[in-house]
Every structure is written in structure tokens, then in C-alpha cells.
Image (cartoon, rainbow, N blue to C red):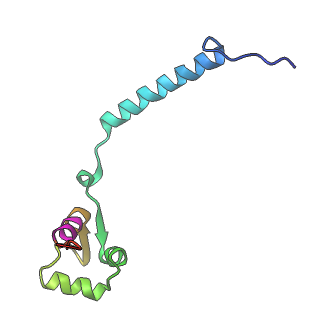
Amino acid sequence: MAQSLLTKESPEIRQFFRNIDTLSRLLDIQAEKFHPLLNGDRYMTDSELAGKLKLTRRTLADYRLNGKIPYYKIGGKLLYKEKDVLALLESNRMEAFD
């Protein structure tokens, strides 16, 4: 069994780079066609948000009723836009040593 040295002129290497070029073109085409759902915004349910913030759902209900947190209500479903929650957290950030 003879081993051959792979060089940039080897058929296997040339085929490999042709495949990479083809994949790159396909990815470029897909990137041009991509349109994120809901303009790329992510939404969370009250259960998901409560879990992430380590709050109870009742506390979230208090925040909603007091106007502290923006939300959407579609039918009986409550949704929170991730960007709104992040902005709310950032606006209420307290520095450790003022």
C-alpha cells in the first residue's frame, strides 16, 4: 500500500476547494434571501420570562398592572418583547459605587 503526498495540485485537494467555493456561493444566496421572522424580535411568555428573571408569575402580573413592564396580550396569551425587557433592565441598573 503506497501512500501519496497531498499537495495543492492533488485532485482530492482541488475537489475539496471546489466544494468549499460551491458551499460559499450557496450560503451567500441563502443570506440574501433570509428575512427574519417578526423582524428578528424575540418574544417570551410570562412563564419563560418569570423563569429567566427568577420571579413569580404573580410578580410579573403586578409589574403589568402597575405599568412597569410592557407586554402584548393576544387573546388570552401574554407576550413580552425581549428588547423591551432588556431596555427595562438596563434603565433600572444601579452602579455598585456611585
Classify residue 63 as left or right of residue 52. left
Numbered circles on residues, count:
0
Classify residue 30 as left or right of residue 91. right
Q: Main secondary structure of the magenta part?
A: helix
Q: What is the quadrant of residue 42 in the picture? A: bottom left
Q: Tell me, yes or no, whether the highlighted magenta stretch contains residue 21.
A: no
Q: Tell me, yes or no, whether the highlighted magenta stretch contains residue 90.
A: yes
Q: Is residue 35 above or below residue 66?
A: above
Q: Residue at x 48, y 29 (%)?
A: 23
Image coords of residue 38 (percent x, y)? 25, 54
Residue lying at the far front in this picture: please name it: 97
Residue lying at the far top in this picture: please name it: 9
Q: Residue at x 20, y 87 (%)?
A: 62
Image coords of residue 96 (percent x, y)? 24, 74
Give 96 or 26, whichever is nearer the viewer: 96
Q: What is the quadrant of residue 94 in the picture? A: bottom left
Image coords of residue 90 (percent x, y)? 20, 67
Q: Magenta part of the protein: which range? A: 86-91
Image coords of residue 74 (percent x, y)? 21, 72
Q: What is the quadrant of residue 60 in the picture? A: bottom left
Q: What is the quadrant of the N terminus in the image?
A: top right
